[in-house]
Image (cartoon, helix red, strand yellow):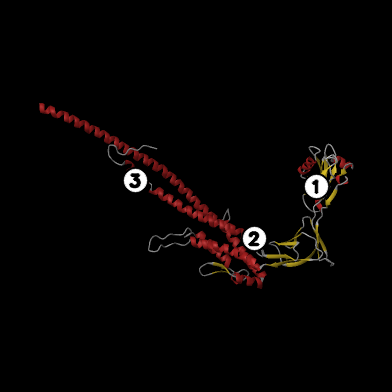
Amino acid sequence: MALSLDGLVSGLKTTELIKALMDVHSIPKNLLKSKIADKGVVISNLQSLNASLQDLAVKAKSASVRGAMSQFTATSSANTVTVTAGANATAGSVDIVVDSVAGRHSIVSAPHAAWPDSPPVVTLQNSKGERVEVTAASTSMQDVAQAINRAGFGVTAAAVRAGSNADGTPLYRLQLNAAEPGAAGSFSVLRGDIASVEAGTAADILADPGAATVSTGTDAQVRLWAGTAAEQIVTSANGTFTDLLPGVDVTVSAASAQPVTVTVTTDVAEQAKAHEAFVTQIAKILSGIDKGSTATVPTGGGATTLGVFTGDSTVRSLRRSLADAVQYPVDGVSPSTMGISIDRYGVLSFDEERFSAALAADPAQVATVFSGLAARVQEVTDTYSDKYDGLLTARITGQQNEVDVLGEQVERWDVRLAQRKASLERTYAQLEVQLSRMQSQSSYLTSQLAALAPQQKGS
């Protein structure tokens, strides 16, 4: 910390005086900093608006596909059959008979105190005929199980306690399971290396006394239009039948002798909510622009406070384009006929009751109008918020460039002010020196005059 001694000779409060002078000299710099702060607020609000537009652009792109906003409820007549309707679903119904569910292949070896072969080598073979040779660290049943698991061949193994032999030695069985259900998960385990398998000398572990197949890997199977000339069999390895109906997945967990009815119906309430959420997001952006463009006049007089978007032609143009995209007719049909309208104050609203009525009367027309509306919204949002050449993006970049230029000016002012302060400090320090010298000369002359006075009296 620098030591400052105010006017020791002059009696001036040098520090305060210099500070007051520097405050005056700093006015242009402070005005620049205030301008930077104001532009920072504008940039922040423009960036927030741009982010909202980019999010809306993504949703508008999805909504512009005809029927993308449709919502469906899927049900089945049996709790052993579950149905899931996706975005591409269509209303419909079909009967299925579940012949079988997906099964996971599983086998168990004969009981052993230790693996009967040394070295302990086994070959795993899958349903495609692919093979992998596995060598365990020892004949321990646990080591054999670990070696099979490490092979990563789609087969898991565990050594399960299976009692003891006559002399009390613990016995273990290897239980091996396919990692995935279905017929493709079937496998076999042979005692020996790949060469012995190819030579036909390797024995299947199921040939050992006490070994068994616990379950066979099978695909789930359902029949459509059972008992008719159009009967068709469909299989699935994991029990889920993807797109059994367009956009509808069906999962079976138990066989059924009687047909199970799978039904997909339009969910009007959920569809209205989905459309309302999209319109509400647009309304929120329009409202935010209006709020940011409003000038505030204080009651009782005072300075008027301008909004962050007041006078911004880019934002004003965006607001107009977005409102036009929502309210203009699509193929001659006004969105207001389905409850999407803008009042005389520019407020966008969604009438759920009116939308539901329009959806019930003509769902195809609702889908057409809304997809067209969403396509126009996407075009507007892309035009303004594209990260490369969007109009709003360019506006933000321009504002940021101005801030950078102002920042450079502030830095130059910092240099000038530092130099000015140093000059003032030197000036006032020199003043003290000169005053000190003058004071010394004054004291000297006073003392000389005082010495001359007695001499004059004596003369």
Residue under numbered circle 3: 20
Q: Residues within 10 Å of mark 1 (few under 14, many from 20)?
A: many
Location of residue 178 with respect to 447 vertically, above or below: below
Name the side, left or right, on which 165 lies relative to 384.
right
How far apart are the alpha carbons under marks 3 and 1?
Answer: 89 Å
Location of residue 19 with respect to 242 vertically, above or below: above
Front-lying residue, 371 or 116: 116
Q: Amino acid at mark 1?
A: Leu
What residue is shown at x 84% (from left), y 50% (from top)?
213
Can see residue 247? Answer: no
Q: Amino acid at mark 3?
A: Ala
Q: Nearer the viewer, mark 2 or mark 1?
A: 1
Q: Position of residue 171 (x, y in %)?
A: 82, 42
Name the side, left or right, on which 290 lies relative to 438.
right
How far apart are the alpha carbons under marks 3 and 2?
Answer: 63 Å
Location of residue 169 with respect to 350 vertically, above or below: above
Residue under numbered circle 1: 176
Q: Position of residue 41 (x, y in %)?
A: 48, 54
Q: Position of residue 145 (x, y in %)?
A: 78, 43
Q: Position of residue 51 (x, y in %)?
A: 56, 56
Name the side, left or right, on which 344 lies relative to 416.
right
- The answer to which quarter of the image holds residue 143 is top right
Q: Amino acid at mark 2?
A: Ser
Of the numbered discs 2 and 1, the one sitting upstream in the chain is: 2
Can see residue 54? Answer: yes
Of the numbered discs in the image, which one, if any, rests on residue 62?
Answer: 2
